[in-house]
Image (tube, rainbow, N blue to C red):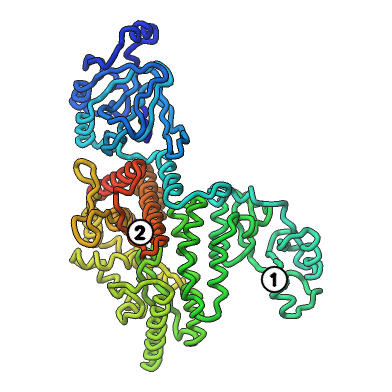
């Protein structure tokens, strides 16, 4: 945060300011009683005990800055005092390497500035100038840091560091310095609403009208689709130019047939208030090129993929079309290598980490779906219903670049005679072994712990999986729980949805009933301390391959994942995505909304930093990894990352106080 705002009374009355300014020629001592009176009226200091207020006041000085005076110079000034504005106002701004000035904030009476530089141990991160004659109380750096360490209330306010302004600037810096900007089209997908892309009112044709008439109307209006209405004009379907080619011309269908015979139904819709990115995801998920647009209950138009995709190269829809079009398994092998280019384009467009991982998930899921579909054409249909289970980051829909495979097969117990059971075992053995080989050739590394569908242990009937989870939940050993915890993030990536839902519901009920299981999860959650020393320097690897590097995954992201998983299982929440879990916990009032807001911002920033780092490493020709040299971070990134780690501490303090239900 640039400045922290509070409210206070005036030390110098405005009537006496002329006299004060005429006689104020430098830093002066100030009576502690006067400072205490101000602190008692200024948040967050007013929440502190009297003893702490007295310590702060005892170290306090007062200084005067005439209008226009530069108080801090970015990157130059050593910040030795926290400045509390007693009278007047300042402006805070940044100057980038191209000498462009960005206004960050205006701060008035009761606001403080300089805290982030003091906390982070860096020179002034912003330039601060007086916009009018200004008096400031100056609180000594050492005394301020001591107060932060001893007072969670004060630490909460200053360590948070996640105002929208700061995080927004950190994202902008990441895009500019690590990826690059796309000047004209940046942010379109992530700022424009669907209503801005709708070209005109919806064109509707009655379902009883002929295909010929539909083709004529599409040509007349120069559009690629028509909504189809019933006798009272309710929209019941959509017909597109692709339908005319595939369902009429290719099949030599009589053009006098009613258009409802070739329409797609029901119509997929998107809200006019949604971002274009949401429309993109819908199109990718359902493999369609058109969506009907609704404003409330009213249809207001149709949006196409061309409307929502403003960039021309490396479109996720283009890659999706390549995946879906493959007729041979070998054709899938090189396609996953195109995902980094798609991600690069999305970051240029302003995508945040959650946007990017959702796109990667959709692309990976469609590649897996195409692979397993082509394999079943070779092996024949499965003898019993099954689903392909994915765990870990894939199960949470948080994959970045080519993370290890973590998967399994769950199938209905065949029952009956031994021959039926044997047939099922053989089928899923072939499916699991071959699929893992193909996924490896597609660029998805094998799991070092062999948690894959090629392992007999992770290719079992539903009844066996129920026993697995029951044993993990009822187990008394922490090590056993930790070994299995990624399975509790599972989701169905392909196959029978009802079977997956049964297993998820069983786990949700059982987990809530086990006190020992929840106790293990809480202990695990608070066990990994954030990588910040007492003096707020980053704790890095001391030796080995990653010496002097910071592990963004293990030390940065995993604590958020563990906390969200523990809380979700504790409350019977079925969601597996970390941000989704946190948001549902807030909605159901299981977590304070302020804590969740900060946790979401912190998690997304670390994930964004990780993605940008991995992308840079890959574009340099190396394999992606999670280890970052803190020296490569800018001052702003360093401040924001430390703030994110402080949020981890707050989550862990919350977890440590939880009663075992």
Specify whether residue 244 is in view.
yes
Q: Nearer the viewer, mark 2 or mark 1?
A: 1
User: Could you tell whether 569 is left or right of 150 in the image?
Assistant: right
Whole-number angstrom distance, CA of label 2 to CA of label 1: 44 Å
Pick the residue in front: 208 or 168.
168
Residue ID for mark 1:
243
Q: Residue at x 23, y 62 (%)?
A: 545
Q: Residue at x 37, y 91 (%)?
A: 422
Question: What crowding class fits label 1: few (fewer than 14 Cα within 10 Å), some (14-19), or many (20 or more)?
Answer: some
Q: Is residue 418 above or below residue 132?
A: below
Give percent across and percent down for residue 72: 34, 27
* Residue 504 image offset from top left, x and y in percent: 38, 67
The spot of residue 336 in percent (x, y) is 46, 69
Q: Which residue is mark 2?
A: 572
Q: How many marks?
A: 2
The answer to whether residue 154 is above or below residue 444 is: above
Please give left or right for residue 516 compared with residue 88 in the image: left
| Mark toward the start of the polypeptide (2 vs 1) | 1
């Amino acid at each position: 945060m640039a400045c922290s705002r509070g409210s206070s009374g005036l030390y110098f009355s405005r009537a006496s300011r002329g006299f004060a300014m005429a006689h104020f020629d430098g830093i002066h001592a100030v009576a502690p009683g006067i400072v205490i009176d101000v602190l008692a009226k200024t948040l967050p200091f007013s929440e502190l005990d009297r003893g702490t207020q007295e310590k702060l006041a005892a170290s306090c000085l007062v200084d005067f800055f005439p209008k226009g005076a530069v108080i801090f110079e970015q990157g130059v000034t050593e910040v030795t005092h926290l400045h509390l504005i007693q009278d007047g106002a300042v402006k805070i701004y940044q100057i980038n390497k191209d000498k462009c000035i960005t206004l960050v904030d205006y701060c008035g009476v009761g606001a403080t500035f300089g805290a982030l530089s003091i906390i982070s141990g860096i020179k002034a991160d912003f330039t601060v100038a007086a916009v009018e004659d200004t008096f400031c109380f100056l609180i000594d750096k050492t005394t301020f840091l001591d107060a932060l360490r001893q007072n969670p209330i004060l630490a909460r306010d200053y360590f948070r560091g996640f105002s929208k302004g700061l995080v927004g600037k950190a994202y902008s810096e990441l895009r500019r310095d690590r990826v690059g900007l796309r000047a004209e089209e940046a942010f379109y997908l992530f700022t424009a609403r669907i209503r801005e892309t709708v070209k005109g009112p919806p064109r509707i044709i009655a379902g009883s009208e002929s295909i010929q008439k539909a083709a004529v109307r599409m040509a007349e209006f120069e559009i690629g689709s028509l909504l189809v209405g019933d006798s009272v004009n309710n929209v019941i379907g959509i017909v597109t130019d692709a339908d005319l080619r595939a369902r009429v011309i290719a099949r030599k269908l009589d053009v006098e047939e009613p258009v409802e015979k070739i329409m797609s139904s029901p119509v997929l819709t998107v809200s006019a208030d949604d971002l274009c990115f949401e429309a993109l995801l819908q199109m990718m998920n359902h493999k369609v090129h058109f969506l009907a647009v609704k404003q409330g209950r009213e249809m207001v138009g149709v949006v196409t993929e061309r409307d929502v995709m403003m960039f021309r190269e490396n479109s996720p829809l283009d890659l999706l079309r390549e995946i879906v079009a493959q007729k041979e398994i070998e054709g899938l092998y090189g396609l996953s290598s195109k995902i980094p280019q798609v991600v690069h384009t999305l970051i240029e467009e302003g995508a945040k980490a959650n946007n990017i991982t959702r796109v990667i998930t959709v692309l990976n899921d469609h590649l897996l779906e195409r692979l397993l579909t082509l394999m079943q054409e070779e092996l024949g249909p499965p003898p019993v219903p099954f689903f392909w289970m994915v765990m870990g980051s894939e199960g949470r829909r948080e994959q970045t670049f080519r993370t290890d495979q973590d998967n399994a097969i769950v199938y209905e117990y065949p029952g009956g005679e031994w021959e039926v059971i044997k047939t099922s075992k053989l089928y899923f053995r072939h499916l699991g072994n071959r699929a893992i080989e193909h996924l490896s050739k597609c660029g998805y590394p094998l799991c070092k712990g062999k948690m894959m569908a090629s392992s007999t242990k992770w290719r079992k009937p539903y009844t066996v999986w129920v026993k697995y989870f029951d044993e993990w939940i009822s187990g008394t050993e922490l090590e056993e729980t930790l070994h299995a915890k990624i399975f509790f993030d599972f989701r169905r990536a392909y196959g029978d949805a009802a079977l997956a839902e049964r297993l998820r519901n069983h786990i949700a009920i059982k987990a809530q009933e086990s006190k020992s299981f929840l106790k293990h999860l809480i202990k695990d959650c608070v066990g990994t301390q954030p990588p910040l020393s007492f003096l707020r320097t980053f704790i890095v690897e001391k030796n080995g391959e990653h010496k002097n590097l910071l592990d963004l995954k293990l030390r940065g992201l995993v604590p958020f994942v563990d906390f969200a998983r523990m809380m979700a299982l504790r409350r019977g929440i079925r969601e597996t995505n970390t941000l989704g879990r946190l948001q549902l916990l807030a909605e159901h009032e299981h977590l304070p909304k302020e804590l969740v807001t900060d946790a979401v911002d912190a998690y997304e920033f670390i994930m964004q930093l990780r993605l940008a780092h991995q992308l840079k490493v890959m574009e340099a020709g190396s394999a992606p990894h999670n280890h970052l040299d803190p020296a490569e971070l800018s001052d702003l990134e360093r401040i924001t990352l430390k703030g994110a780690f402080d949020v981890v501490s707050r989550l862990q303090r919350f977890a440590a106080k939880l009663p075992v239900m």
